[in-house]
Image: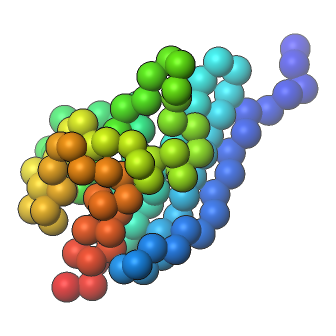
Amino acid sequence: MSDRLPRSSSRELTFENGTAIGISNRWNKGQYCSILTEAGIVGCGIYDLVTPAEFDQAIAIAKGTPANPLVEPEDLFEAKIVGCTPKAEGFGISVGMTGREAVELMLKAETT
């Protein structure tokens, strides 16, 4: 049995419209990352959109590739959004924008 534990880290990230929590989780041959705001999550492709949409949650996802995976929350800054829930769309988030743009819209949404 291995004594090695998976790695989980979080840190505060500063944006123009406020602050959010960046999260990275890694394990043997796997990882995911996200940026958590008061209004919702910008995350990698591991996140599902169907269930959060059912619960009226704001989720926007970007997708990495096996050659260029999204590992740290900062990797989401320039990654393109490939899907989002209707709640996220209501904040102005759309497919094709960057993760940073999506976070800024979520941060703006939480103050209005």
Farthest residue in the top direction?
A: 1
Q: How far from the left and from the top, in percent, is residue 98?
A: 32, 51
Residue 69 in view in this figure:
yes
Residue 49 in view in this figure:
no
Residue appearing at x 55%, y 68% in the figure: 13
Q: How far from the left and from the top, in percent, is residue 109?
A: 23, 75
- Height in image: 35 above or below 8? below
Which of these two is toward me, 110 or 78?
78
> How many numbered circles are shown?
0
Horizontally, residue 31 falls left or right of residue 104, namely: right
Residue appearing at x 31%, y 42% in the figure: 80
Which of these two is toward me, 31 or 54?
31
- Height in image: 109 above or below 2? below
Farthest residue in the front direction?
A: 78
- State which quarter of the image contains the C terminus: bottom left
Residue appearing at x 38%, y 59% in the figure: 100
Residue appearing at x 24%, y 56% in the figure: 58
Which of these two is toward me, 4 or 29?
29
Which of these two is toward me, 61 or 65?
65
Horizontally, residue 50 falls left or right of residue 42, namely: left
Please tell me in which quadrant of the rendered image residue 28 appears: top right
